[in-house]
Amino acid sequence: MKPEHKDEMKARARNVCLKLAYDGTAYHGFQRQTPPVIAVQNVLEKKLEIVFGDSIELAASGRTDAGVHALGQVVNFFTDGRIPVDRIPRAVNSLLPQDIAILEAWEADREFSARHSAKSKTYLYRIQQGEVPNPLTARYAWYIRRPLEIERMQQALDLILGEHDFSAFRAAGGAPMSPVRTIYRALVEETEGNQLLCTLHGNGFLYHMVRNIMGTLVHVGTGKLSVKDFKSIMDSRNRNNASATAPAHGLYLSHVEY
């Protein structure tokens, strides 16, 4: 929500939380944009205002980039609207486009913030392999024609477990904050349809951090970089040493823990 409206919004009767999923292909990220540029937040706030009968300003667990998808984005907002929480998903979904859906709704205490109360997040990244591209996954996975060596990729991912300075995988333009993060789980595995699924669970992520890790990890998988090279890149704390940022359309905000 806008800082200048925070006190006004928090004076309202209810703090409502939503869990939502969306296909990010058609949107300029989650965070509200100035029309004609449209973000998920623009669409969702407009439909919520119809259902609740007052102005809505969302706070979100994370500002996913243009083209990034979500399976478990969490938002909260303050409202005087009286619709029961069990009726919210159906009411709002009836107004939303097919690429956005409310999965759950609940009421939280007044101090809960989808952004500031989050303890950890899980991101998924999908890679589509194969000699021929799959048009049915083109919007949802990064296509890599060359076979990737999963064992080497997992060895590289093992190096990011625990607390580290992730400056080497931090893009310029993000909010000023400590580059130190803790990764609890980092796994790459084969899934159906000749896909690879990478899961990263940590206490927080820097701007483009997951996509920059994935860009570098794929180069480990193709043999362009060794596992030792990956460690040297991370230890250098220099973004210029890492590989190019992986495409947005393979990334999913999967789960937020509170």
Image: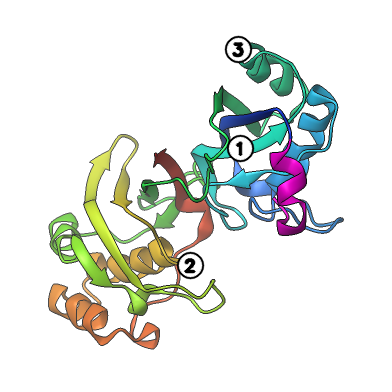
Q: Is 8 situated above or below 51?
A: below
Say whether residue 64 is visible: yes
**Are circles 1 and 3 on residues that touch, CB within 8 Å?**
no
**Above or below, 217 relative to 80:** below
Residue 26 coordinates in the image, percent (x, y): 69, 47
In the drawing, does residue 30 fall left or right of residue 35?
left
Q: Is residue 4 magenta?
A: yes
Q: Is residue 252 magenta?
A: no
Instruction: Examine the image and state in which quarter residue 143 appears.
Output: bottom left
Q: Main secondary structure of the magenta part?
A: helix
| Amino acid bearing label 3 | Asp
Its colouring scheme is rainbow
At x 75% / y 19%, what residue is drawn? Answer: 94
Identify the residue under disc 1. 76
Q: Residue at x 42, y 50 (%)?
A: 132
In the image, which is nearer the foreground, mark 1 or mark 2? 1
Residue numbers of the magenta segment: 1-11
- Dot 2 falls on a residue whose secondary structure is loop
Relative depth, front residue between 28 and 31: 31
Assess disc 1: are there few (<14), some (14-19) or many (≥20) residues with their C-alpha within 10 Å of its C-alpha.
Answer: many
Q: Residues within 10 Å of mark 3 (few under 14, many from 20)?
A: few
Circle 3: element type = helix
- Which numbered tag is attached to residue 86? 3
How far apart are the alpha carbons under marks 3 and 2?
A: 35 Å
Please tell me whether residue 225 is drawn above or below residue 31 in the rendered image: below
Q: Is residue 136 visible?
A: no
